[in-house]
Amino acid sequence: MKIIKATTSKVASLGLPSLALIWTCFFWGTTWLASKEGVKYIPALQLAAIRQFIGAFCYISFFLFKGAPWPKGKQWITILILSILNFVLSNGLSTWGVKYISSGLGAVIGAIFPLWIVVISFFNGEKLSRLAIIGLLVCFSGVCIVFYDYLADFMKPDFQFGIFLSVIATITWAFGSLYTKKKAKNFNPYFSLGLQMGISSILLFAYTGATGTSVNITQIPSQAWWAIAYLVVFGSLTTFVAFIYALQNLPTEVSSIYAYINPIIAVILGAVIFNEPLTLTLILGVLVVLLGIYLVNLAIKK
């Protein structure tokens, strides 16, 4: 009887974290479509700024209510650097990028950031393992397959610009990930996340205001506000909480599955909702890319 109760308790304890992981896999994949929808109506950087400002308000309000201490001294420098790398550049540029490319393609490009971690580590003097090199080659092959269906689009300047923005976004995210691992261990990471969003929203608002690339807030259509609301609720708040919960209660190799499922969700829903291309070549390319990323992640863990 005790064994049955223990087994039931263990299954129940895994049930909620598993649901949290499923939530993360699905909804973070859908945020690419919400960004694609939002940039139809307002400038991409303004969309990112509004999303981050509202998300920051929610996070900071919660931690102020809880009486959390503010960062001190050099901690502010770390938070400022991360806000630029993770939110101004990575989130801002990836949002801007899907204005010119499909949401599915943006998600696939976004998934390759572990490759840049390996490349950056190599230039920092770390020796690449054979598994990492194989993963890089497999992933590069997958990217070539993915872009086979887009060869004609490479002649379009807007498409080239969208690819450029999306790739730069993955590089800055990789730098942000490495910097977080090195510097951001001495302060509440969740409070830090809210502060990063707040600082980045101020910087983005300043840029769009100075360059005249924003629209009057009263002229933003309801479609854009719905997209922003979706991004805040499912991109910045609930899904992030679900991800942290899954990370704390599931093995790392299980909780990291979201990185492989998000692009698949984005590609499939992009085809269903926005009529984005979904060909056998694209499907094969995405699977090869994800295999390469898996090998690279495995090499990083080892």
Image: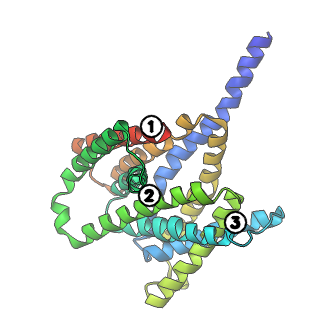
- Residue 94, percent across and down? 42, 64
Give the percent coordinates (x, y) of residue 246.
63, 41
Disc 1 marks which amino acid?
Leu
State the residue at coordinates (62%, 67%): 78
Where does the N terminus fall, quadrant-wise?
A: top right
Q: Is residue 282 visible?
A: no
Mark toward the start of the polypeptide (1 vs 3): 3
- Measured along the vertical axis of the image, is residue 192 above or below residue 145? below
Q: Which amino acid type is marked by label 2?
A: Trp
User: Earlier along the polypeptide chain: callout 2 or callout 1?
Assistant: 2
Residue position marked by numbered label 1 in the rendering: 298
Mark 2 and mark 3: Cα distance apart in space? 22 Å
Could you classify mark 2 by the number of other residues whose Cα lies within 10 Å: few (under 14), some (14-19), or many (20 or more)? many
**Label 1 neighbour load within 10 Å: few <14, some 14-19, many 20+:** some
Residue 137 versus residue 104 in the image, above or below: above
Q: Which mark is residue 109?
A: none
Question: Residue shown at 37%/46% (left/top)?
Answer: 268
208 vs 180: above or below: below
Pointers 2 and 3 in contact (CB under 8 A)? no
Which residue was labeled with disc 2? 32
> Which residue is pictured at 61% across the width and 75% down the height?
199
Of 134 and 248, the residue lying toward us: 134
Sequence-wise first label, 2 or 3: 2
User: Is label 1 in a helix, a strand or a loop?
Assistant: helix
Separation (CA) of disc 2 from disc 1: 26 Å
Task: Kindly identify which residue carries mark 3.
Answer: 58
Task: Name the residue nearer the viewer: 186 or 6.
Answer: 186
